[in-house]
Amino acid sequence: MGRKLRRKEPTRLTEAKISKLKIPAGKSEDTWFDSEIRGFGVRKRGNDATYVLQYQLNGKTSKLRLGLCSEIKCDVAREMARAKRGEISKARLGLGIDPALERESKKAEAKKPKPKTLGAYITDYLEIKKAVMRATTYDNSKYYLETLWAPLHPLPLREVDRAKVAAELAAMSKQRKDGKRKLGGPITANRARACLSAFFHWAIGEGIADQNPVAGTNKREEKARERVLTDAEAAAVFLACDKTPEEEKHDYHRIVQLILLTGCRRDEIGGLQWSEIDLEKRTITLPGSRTKNHREHIVPLSNRALEILKAVPHRDKREFLFGYGKAGYSGWSKSKTGLDSVAKISAWTLHDLRRTAATRMADLGVQPHIIEAALNHVSGSKAGVAGIYNRSTYEPEKRAALEKWANYLLMAVAKANGANVTPLRKA
């Protein structure tokens, strides 16, 4: 128990008085009480001075810490003490909680381990999946889960419910602009939805979630892309690759031309490795780990495609043909903007080049199952039971089809340059 202020001094505590209080010799701490509010005082311990409120309740003496004198004005601390004494009076009548017990309860609650959050579990999930996902699939999952679902990251996993997921999906589906880039939209929302659903499917299997809150949320309606470049547009893109200043190309021009000539996907060419190329056999062999359907894909190379690959320089024992980092090419957005400024055609994507190649091969009389084989599609003639028994890879037919398409494209390029050429007829 502390001591009262000396009677020859003012009985009311003030900042000035508190600054002059000294701990008696031989003691490590002391408390001085104010006479205006019973139990309100200042406790000094070392260099720290703290406002306190001492009271008795149910035969027990308790002392509440109100705050440091260096951080709270004396009048403010006095009002806090009055408020606490009101709570104590209610507690005596059985109408409230003892402030000291409430404080201890909060301390105990704070010491309890906090439930693991969605963000923490997503980190675990991505670390596990990195070893088994294709590089592109992993990068996309990482973006959707870490970036687009970030607003839900602080929540404990069990507090992520359908209403919260639906609200975030609604926000994602609204297209907005970030500088020159368009963000969001129905497709983005649907891809983010699929990634989060896959995460919760894993979480249920691990026993850390009981249900998938994505289930039952609405999938946004997508408008399938049908953009096929005209011959003039395809030629404009091909020529723009050659016209782009060398210092601005950064491999992108070769990648775009190869996508157009081979019908391969963006990341299949962007992540191309020297070990996948056989210049003598004139082929690219993509392992199943790098294809969308996880099937090995042999891509016959037309004369022009072979010329492009032969011109690619080897860089310091680097396994990847394109790019400069630890993986393949990565500067997609910036390079596309630069190419668009030269090509000057309406909105198009790299995947449109793949669709264009398939469409033009059909126009040239190539059979659908050969086009599917050339693009490594598993549908139609190679789907289901037919695919089990028909194991042919159609290598000669694929080579003939891609060479025919390359010749057709190069004639369109020559025509765009002013040459007088006659298009090939259907086979």
Image (spheres, rainbow, N blue to C red):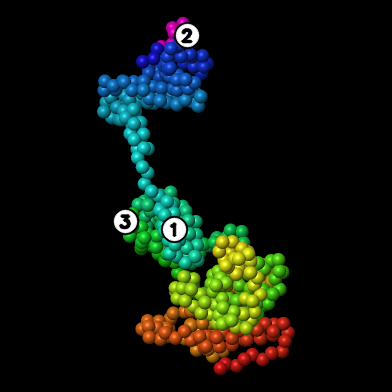
Q: Mark 1 falls on what kind of element?
A: helix
Pointer 3: what residue?
207
Residue 8 colored magenta? Answer: yes
The residues tagged by marks 3 and 1 sit, at their Cα atoms, a distance apart of 17 Å
The answer to whether one can see residue 316 in this image is: yes
Q: Mark 2 falls on what kind of element?
A: loop
Provide residue 379's location: percent of width, then percent of height. 43, 81
Numbered badge on residue 126: 1
The residues tagged by marks 2 and 3 sit, at their Cα atoms, a distance apart of 68 Å
Pointer 2: what residue?
9
Provide residue 6's location: percent of width, then percent of height. 44, 8
User: What residue is rendered at 33% in x and 34% in y?
Assistant: 105
Span highlighted in magenta in the image: 4-11
The residues tagged by marks 2 and 1 sit, at their Cα atoms, a distance apart of 68 Å
Q: Amino acid at mark 1?
A: Leu
**Which one is nearer the viewer's eye here, 299 or 245?**
299
Residue 80 found in image quarter:
top left
**Which one is nearer the viewer's eye here, 163 or 70?**
70
Residue 102 colored magenta? Answer: no
The answer to whether one can see residue 333 in this image is: no
